[in-house]
Amino acid sequence: MLSRPYQADELFRPAPHGPKSDRPDHMNLSAHRRPGRAIDMASLRGAGVYGLFLDGALFYVGIYSGAKTDSMAGSVLTRWRLHLTYQTLRSPNVCFTAADVARILDDAPNAPFDAIAGALGGREVDRGALAAQGHPLIETTGASCTYRKARFAARNWDLLRPGREDEMFARISFVYARLDPAALPVGVPMDRAHRQWIKYKWLERCERHLIDALKPICNKETAVGTEQQATLDDFRRELIEALKEPLPPYSSKDASVSADLASTEAPTVAAEHIAEPVDTDDSCAPGEIAFRARLDPPGEAFLDELDLIAPAGIELDYVGIPQARLYREPGHAVLVKITATSRGVLRGYARTGAGVVQALGFADPVEKPGWTDFAIDPAIHQPTALIALAGAVIGGSA
């Protein structure tokens, strides 16, 4: 089922803050979820294929495979929020492989590439030494950006540069082709084997077709210089084409699966909905991917709401430990840290006393030097309590 186009400013608001050290000044932007908007969130939950557009021209095709424990849970907004600032070279967490850094340094001069070169020490810098020294713009595992995405940003820098955030958010849009949950066989167990099958056998097949046919500039499969300016109509047409051949049913020969499921029909995206006119009134950071991979659906929903309600001056972000954190902006001071065990159990750590934590509804906090440790139960606690706790930390440090 293909969604209507969502303008970025319907879903998110720009949240500028200072860049991190050794990064260009323009890498100073996050995207925060907008609360109180009339958005059909159910249509954006669960696995599917999506497209990102700038002024109606497709620049990226991606997939979202859902939550760790259920492919039909989790929100694609977690992916889109990151795309907005990573693919535009605006996030303070942008980083590249050493090979892509070399391509940027070798490319023709332009404002964002010149700024990246400056942060690295100039275009003639010793590149081997940069990688060996662990420069923050170079990542050996899980780079958050690519040369192709940087090239897209450079081409559109007059719009994407600092000072034009509101217009940038108004002109980028998203569409989502969600896997139809009604077509799933009854009682499908969402174990790892089934979720991997959905991702690699169903979603990636559609994704590959769209990329091959439409050649969006930011996808790694699109050779530099062959990119096209595909439209939403092109995306819709090729999605229908990709689904003409039935998706393969789950097979016990490929993974462990019960006999009854092996004989069922594969779920499909409802092509009849794709053909309808669209109402004109679309790579996660490694830290967030690793953190969310530990969560069950209630934990993911808790995190999504926390992101949704974070007010100006408080930002939800992630580090690779993995850990979620509430920061004070500007300044990027840590207010609250959130960890998750391999079983998805959440714990919080706040820079305040145990009395404050307990007063906000978190039972049995343990005060330690510099932090108070406490349990977070999504069945009991509300994300608003964590925002209030972050506010209390700010108030206590004022």
Image (cartoon, grey):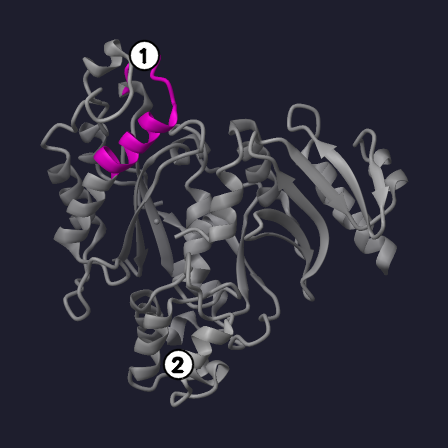
Quadrant in which residue 147 is drawn? bottom left
The answer to whether residue 169 is seen in the rendering is: no
Q: Which residue is mark 2?
A: 127
Q: Secondary structure at mark 2?
A: helix
Magenta span of residues: 184-203
Q: Secondary structure at mark 1?
A: loop
- Give coordinates of residue 110: x percent, y percent: 35, 83
Quadrant in which residue 301 is drawn? top right
Furthest-top residue in view? 260
Q: CA distance from mark 2 to mark 1?
A: 55 Å
Furthest-right residue in view? 355
Residue 81's place in the image compared with 217, above or below, is: above
Q: Quadrant of the C terminus?
A: bottom right
**Amino acid on which disc 2 is placed:** Arg
Residue 384's place in the image compared with 256, above or below, is: below
N-terminal of the pair, mark 2 or mark 1, is 2
Q: Residue at x 54, y 53 (%)?
A: 320
Using residue 332 as the reference point, say whether residue 300 is left or right of it. Answer: left
Viewer-side residue, 212 vs 369:
369
Viewer-side residue, 191 vs 285:
191
Q: Quadrant of the N terminus?
A: top left
- Give coordinates of residue 51: x percent, y percent: 29, 49
Using residue 284 as the reference point, say whether residue 194 is left or right of it. Answer: left
Q: How packed is label 1: few (under 14 Cα within 10 Å), some, or many (20 or more)? A: few
The answer to whether residue 33 is seen in the rendering is: yes
**Amino acid on which disc 1 is placed:** Val
